[in-house]
Image (cartoon, rainbow, N blue to C red):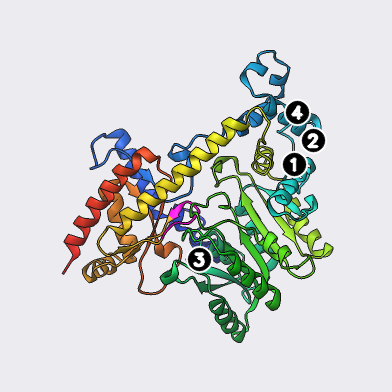
């Protein structure tokens, strides 16, 4: 049939048509339709609510914001509150003091104004101090670019590095689909390296070497290596020795190391600890001229979960002044990141300290969130491992479980007939039966012939038993239906 519109898909950029982002894909759209059905016709489905376990969006699933952060943001957005007598009774002394300090850094004390394209200098100073305190090595505020969450920073780096489809970026499989989508949008080549599921999603240097050699033999100009630590969707936290191998690999091969470190606060395994790649490289004796490193961080994850505020930054080290000018130019095209997000990025790197009025309440809120996430991760891990044909490795960090499902042949055949991937078929059936939204492993990449799904650990702790019960009942019925 002829279209009623003057423009058609043929008029669009083919790179846009080619890219995919499963986390907010068709299954989520269907979930939103079901949610509308439940609102308009209660009882119309065999569940009473939709549980969005597809995306790391903590506040949407009931996590409360950190009080100190929100107090500072409120005072910065409405500085007239600072002149009111009742403010001292409503806000902690250190949140008032911090807001005054921040406002003094902002032209006209107005959060509604544009800032410097790289971000407000005083806020970058705070972030640099936080990085230095974390790593034990100097950090330069001029290396920091404040962005609307980590995603725009990733896009900026892909714009900077990719000039044609001959330019390649090494990315993990499974991976957060922002990377494959951004590589596609910017016209580059996605070079997959596979994490080893049999050893709990380990990153093997031999795999990197093989994929790099193969890509170069095809004439691909490999520019960079993406590493996500802690892992999304795998939950793996890299060991320090492994990180040293990765740094040495990038240095030897002349690759830019793109370090996605947005889950650095989310480490649950008692035998694991987060180390930034900046700390690792400097502790190995490598300086600015030895390795080009970009570290991404975000206010959306951690214990803060402030996804909607869109705060983040990248630390851009080991590049010449000429290259720095080009990344600044890209930042300038976007004018600046939002000011509330900039403030929040500075706060997560400089939270209350011992002696501050809000320190005890802040620490209690932070510890309660992280300890609850650790318990939820363990409950879901055990529940998935109890299901027939399901294997789930320990979530050492981040916000997800990534179980593997051994689906019956009959289910795989039914998926083929429905013209969908088997794990997507499973996810659709799960949603329609239980209201639980997960993302199929095919949206993240996986070895051929294996099937997975990603499930967040974010539903509030009191809801986890009901989720486990629904999931268990559905899985048993699914396997009974398609067995044999």
Nearer mark to the viewer, of 4 and 2: 4
- Residue annotated with mark 1: 123
- Of 309 and 250, nearer the camera is 250
- Residue annotated with mark 2: 105
Give me the C-alpha separation between circle 3 and circle 1: 38 Å
Q: Quadrant of the N terminus?
A: bottom left
Mark 4 or mark 1, which is nearer the start of the sequence? 4
Q: Quadrant of the C terminus?
A: bottom left
- Residue annotated with mark 4: 100
Establish if 367 lies above or below 454: above
- The image shows residue 481 at horizontal and vertical percentages of 17, 61
- Residue annotated with mark 3: 18
Crowding around mark 3 (Cα neighbors within 10 Å: few <14, some 14 to 19, many 20+) is few
Secondary structure of residue under mark 1: helix
Whether residue 290 sits left or right of residue 33 in the image: it is right
- The image shows residue 391 at horizontal and vertical percentages of 34, 63
- Of 239 and 484, nearer the camera is 239
Tell me the magenta residue range. 394-400
Give me the C-alpha separation between circle 2 and circle 1: 8 Å
Circles 1 and 4, Cβ within 8 Å, touching? The answer is no
Q: Main secondary structure of the magenta part?
A: loop
Mark 1 or mark 2, which is nearer the start of the sequence? 2
Crowding around mark 4 (Cα neighbors within 10 Å: few <14, some 14 to 19, many 20+) is some
């Amino acid at each position: 049939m002829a279209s009623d519109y003057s423009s058609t898909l043929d008029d669009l950029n083919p790179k846009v048509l080619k890219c995919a982002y499963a986390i907010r894909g068709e299954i989520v759209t269907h979930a939103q339709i079901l949610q509308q059905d439940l609102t308009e016709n209660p009882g119309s489905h065999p569940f009473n609510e939709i549980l969005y376990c597809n995306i790391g969006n903590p506040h949407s699933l009931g996590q409360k914001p950190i009080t100190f952060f929100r107090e500072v943001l409120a005072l910065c957005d409405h500085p007239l509150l600072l002149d009111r007598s009742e403010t001292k009774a409503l806000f902690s002394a250190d949140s008032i003091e911090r807001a005054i300090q921040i406002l003094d850094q902002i032209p006209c004390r107005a959060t509604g104004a544009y800032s410097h394209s790289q971000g407000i200098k005083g806020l970058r100073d705070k972030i640099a101090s936080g990085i230095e305190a974390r790593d034990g090595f100097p950090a330069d505020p001029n290396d920091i670019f404040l962005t609307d969450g980590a995603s725009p920073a990733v896009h900026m780096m892909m714009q900077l590095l990719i000039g044609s489809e001959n330019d390649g970026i090494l990315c993990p499989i499974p991976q957060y689909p922002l990377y494959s989508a951004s590589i596609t949008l910017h016209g580059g080549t996605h070079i997959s390296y596979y994490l080893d599921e049999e050893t709990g999603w380990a990153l093997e240097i031999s795999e990197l070497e093989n994929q790099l050699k193969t890509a170069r033999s095809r004439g691909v100009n490999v520019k960079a290596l993406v590493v996500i630590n802690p892992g999304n969707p795998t939950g793996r936290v890299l060991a320090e020795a492994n990180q040293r191998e990765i740094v040495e690999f990038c240095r030897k091969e002349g690759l830019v190391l793109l370090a996605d470190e947005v889950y650095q606060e989310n480490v649950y395994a008692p035998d694991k600890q987060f180390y930034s790649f900046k700390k690792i490289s400097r502790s190995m004796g490598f300086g600015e001229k030895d390795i080009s490193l970009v570290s991404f961080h975000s206010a959306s994850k951690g214990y803060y979960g402030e996804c909607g505020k869109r705060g983040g930054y990248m630390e851009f080290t080991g590049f010449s002044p000429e290259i720095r000018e080009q990344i600044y130019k890209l930042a300038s095209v976007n004018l600046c990141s939002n000011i509330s997000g900039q403030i929040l990025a500075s706060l997560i790197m400089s939270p209350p300290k011992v002696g501050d009025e809000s320190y005890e309440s802040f620490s209690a809120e932070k510890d309660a969130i992280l300890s609850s996430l650790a318990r939820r991760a363990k409950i879901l891990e055990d529940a998935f491992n109890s299901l027939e044909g399901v294997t789930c490795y320990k979530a050492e960090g981040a916000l997800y479980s990534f179980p593997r499902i051994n689906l019956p042949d009959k289910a795989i055949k039914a998926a083929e007939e429905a013209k969908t991937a088997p794990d997507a078929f499973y996810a659709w059936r799960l949603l329609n039966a239980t209201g639980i939204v997960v993302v199929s492993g095919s949206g993240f990449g996986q070895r051929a012939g294996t099937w997975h799904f990603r499930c967040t650990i974010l539903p509030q702790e009191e809801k986890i038993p009901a989720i486990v019960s629904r999931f268990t009942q559905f899985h048993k019925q699914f396997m009974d239906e398609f067995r044999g």
